[in-house]
Structures are given as C-alpha cells and as structure tokens.
Image (tube, rainbow, N blue to C red):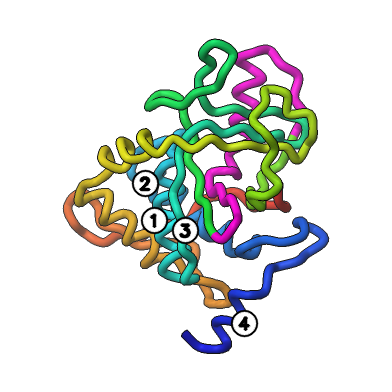
Amino acid sequence: MSPEFIRERSVMISNENIGPEFLIPLVDFERIHKVINTIIRNEGSIPEQSCILFSIYGAEILSEHYGINANVCTGVAAYNIEGNPVFWGKMVSDCLISNKDAYHSWIEAEGFVIDFMAPFLPKLIQMQQEHFCQKINPVQPKMFQRKLLNMCKPTLDLSSKNDFFLIKNNELLERLLDDNSNAGFEYFKKVASDNYQRPPKIMGDKISVEDKNLNVIDVPLVGAKLVGSW
C-alpha cells in the first residue's frame, strides 16, 4: 500500500455544507448510490425496498475501490430525519424487533454508519405521512454517514434531529445473505464494482450490464442529486 494511499485514507473529508467528518466524500456517495440504484431498477426491483442490495453492493465498492473493510448489517434502525422519525422494524410488546418482513440494512466501516439507500428517505417519509396521516417536515435527498459513537440509546422518542440508533440482527443477516447467494446476485455485485469509477476519474452517464440474452447493453445512470448529509 503506497504512502499516498495511506495519507489519503487517513484524512476525513470536512465541508461546512455537508457536515463535519465523513468516511467518503459526498460526490463519491452520490455516484455509488446512482450505480446501485440503476442496477436495481434495471432488474425490475423497487430501490426503496432494496436496502440489503444497496448495502451488499455498496460494501463491495468500498472494499474494491477504497480498501475499506465494510461490513453489511441488518436489523432494527431508527433515524430522525430533520424532525421526521423513521423506523424499520416491528413493534412487539412496546419493543422494536426485526424479522424477514420488517428490517433495514446498512454498512458499518471504520466507526461509521453508511446508508446508500438514504436518498430515498424523503419518499419513504412522504409514504409514511400518507399512511399514518402525519404532518411531516419536507426534506431533500441527502447522504447518510454518521459516526457510530454518536448513536443514541434505543428509544421510540427520537427527540433530536440528529438522533439515530441501530440494533443488529446477525441471524437475520445470515438468512438474507443466503437468500441472495446465487450466480445472478454475484454477477450484479461485480457489475456494480466494475462500473463504478472513483473520483476524480470521469464516469459517464451510463453503465454496462448483460440483458436476459447475455448481450451487453448500456443503461442510463439514474439517481437523485444530493444536497448535503444527515
């Protein structure tokens, strides 16, 4: 490993517009999100319901392009997004639990939480408002990178706009990984990493994938423009 790479990895990104310290810059986060989002959409899945794929494909990119030991995690998650509490899990006897039908997935790496599905939070918040007839604070798509040491204790009262907590369920994670352990899944994980170009390298507005007839086709890169960080 070169001294230049070591120095680069040791410097956290600081920008008053997106927050204090992050593991990867905003532009990198946005580009990773768009690559994964495009692959998921092209395969006919619903991106905002595909947190496990965002995490697995994202961890592969972080490992291959940044040398980061990124761990996929699954379980209960709760974020306060600009005054809007968002929960993933199932309420049982006043406690949040996770199971195969109610969970969230994220990445933990070098003391950080990274959620590459986070740009869909405004849409999820809007859906929550419509379902529960709640009043919400409008938000714009942003990235989610937070230090694990800033995580609050599990509570249903996320009183601060920066509150978040996570409860890992390793048994559930193993089941989900088993469900996705097939040749097609491995192929798309490789597609995500192969198509990604780490800044400052130039990346086009399309990615290349194989169609059902094994022909390589170009698919337009799609995803939101991010305006900051939660």
Tell me: residue 72, above or below residue 62.
above
* C-alpha distance separating marks 2 and 4: 37 Å
- Residue 144: give x, y in percent of width and height: 63, 48
* Mark carried by residue 117: none
* Amino acid type, mark 2: Asn
Q: Residue at x 63, y 36 (%)?
A: 165
Mark before the other along the chain sequence, 3 or 4: 4
Disc 1 residue type (three-letter): Val
Cα separation, mark 1 vs mark 3, equals 27 Å
Tell me the magenta residue range.
110-138
Please indicate, yes or no, whether residue 47 appears anywhere in the rendered image. no
Label 1 belongs to which residue? 219
**Residue underneath mark 2:** 42
Q: Earlier in the sequence, mark 1 or mark 4?
A: 4
Magenta segment includes 117? yes
Q: Which residue is denoted by mark 4 in the rendering?
A: 7
Q: Secondary structure at mark 2?
A: helix
Q: Earlier in the sequence, mark 2 or mark 1?
A: 2
User: Taking 100 as reference, is 207 above or below it?
Assistant: below
The mark nearer the N terminus, 2 or 4, is 4
The label nearer to you, 2 versus 4, is 4
Q: Choose between 37 and 90: the one closer to the eye.
A: 90
Instruction: Report whether 123 appears left or right of 220.
Output: right
What's the amino acid at mark 4? Arg
Name above or below for residue 92 compared with residue 109. Answer: above
Residue at horizontal 55 percent and vertical 22 percent from the top: 96
Among the two numbered marks 2 and 3 on one chain, the one whose residue lies closer to the N terminus: 2
